[in-house]
Amino acid sequence: MIAHVNGIDLSWDDVGAGVPVVFLHGFPLDRTFWKPQLSALIAQARCIAPDLRGFGDSTPAAPYSMDQYADDVVALLDHLGIDRAVIAGLSMGGYVAFALWRRHRERVRALILADTRATADSAEGLEKRRALLEVARREGSGAVATRQLPTLLGATTRERNPDVAEWLHLMMAMQPVEGVAGAIEAMMARPDSTPDLATITVPTLIVVGEEDTLTPPSDAAAMAGAIRGARLETLTLAGHLAPVERPAAFNHIVAEFVASLVYC
Ligand code: MLT
């Protein structure tokens, strides 16, 4: 589906019925990343997966920032007539979830933070982003995909699941280079969300792959320690893209969490 919001065409999938859950993809992915979740969770939840601006079928258009991505999600909720939703963000999607919490917390029913972190980029991280931005501008999204993918997948997936790696490489290589470059700059400029963690008052589930080297289990534990009542789940045999590396285990945890919200 496509709607014109905030001056762009925003594309999304919307399946199932029940508690609305908005799935925010990571970088440099798109809404189809969440296919294993949408196909499994339709009986438990209304699953909404947008393409963030500049990814998938959503228009590449400045400005790019975590705040703008968050405002686009809220514009989509308005378009759909949804008051509050569970916000599930993977990695960069988690950075967007933090922006959503800062700017529109009344729209957040609960949070699912998957393979993400609250901190901003370190000096070394910023250096790596500058290099990646160069690659994106000089060689395009395919080169970004080739460079990024090995760091995203866990060692077990790299060794045992070439089909997932191939599927993800294709998805990453297809992204419009303007959106990819815009997202790199947006991530570089994102603020430290650590001070916001203590303000989170909604039920929060944190999931991390044990083999995640980009946002490792120590980052997840730090967030869980700072968010009151947060539940932390660590998935063995999964890396930074746990939802597609261990889909059945991830879906089970999310389904249980969403079901538990009736008691909160
Ligand atoms: C992602 O998966 O969204 C990215 O790895 C996030 C990042 O590079 O910080």
Image (cartoon, grey):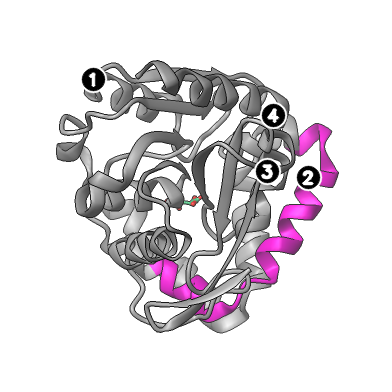
The alpha-carbon separation of the residues under discs 1 and 4 comes to 27 Å
Give the foreground label among 4 and 3.
3
For marks 1 and 4 on the same chain, the one whose residue lies earlier in the sequence:
1
Q: Where residue 214 sits in the image (x, y, percent)?
A: 47, 40
Residue ID for mark 3: 38
Residue ID for mark 2: 164
Tell which residue pokes out farthest to the front in this image: 81
Give the foreground label among 1 and 2.
1
For label 3, count other residues whose C-alpha is less than 10 Å away and answer few (under 14), some (14-19) or many (20+).
Answer: many
For marks 4 and 2 on the same chain, the one whose residue lies earlier in the sequence:
2
Q: Give the secondary structure at mark 1.
A: loop
The alpha-carbon separation of the residues under discs 4 and 3 comes to 14 Å
The segment highlighted magenta reads 158-184
For label 1, count other residues whose C-alpha is less than 10 Å away and answer few (under 14), some (14-19) or many (20+).
Answer: some
Residue ID for mark 1: 228
Q: Where residue 177 sits in the image (x, y, percent)?
A: 56, 78
Residue ID for mark 4: 246
For marks 2 and 3 on the same chain, the one whose residue lies earlier in the sequence:
3
Q: Quadrant of residue 251?
A: top right
The alpha-carbon separation of the residues under discs 2 and 3 comes to 17 Å
Residue 165 belongs to the span the image colors magenta: yes
Q: Is residue 74 left or right of residue 181?
A: left
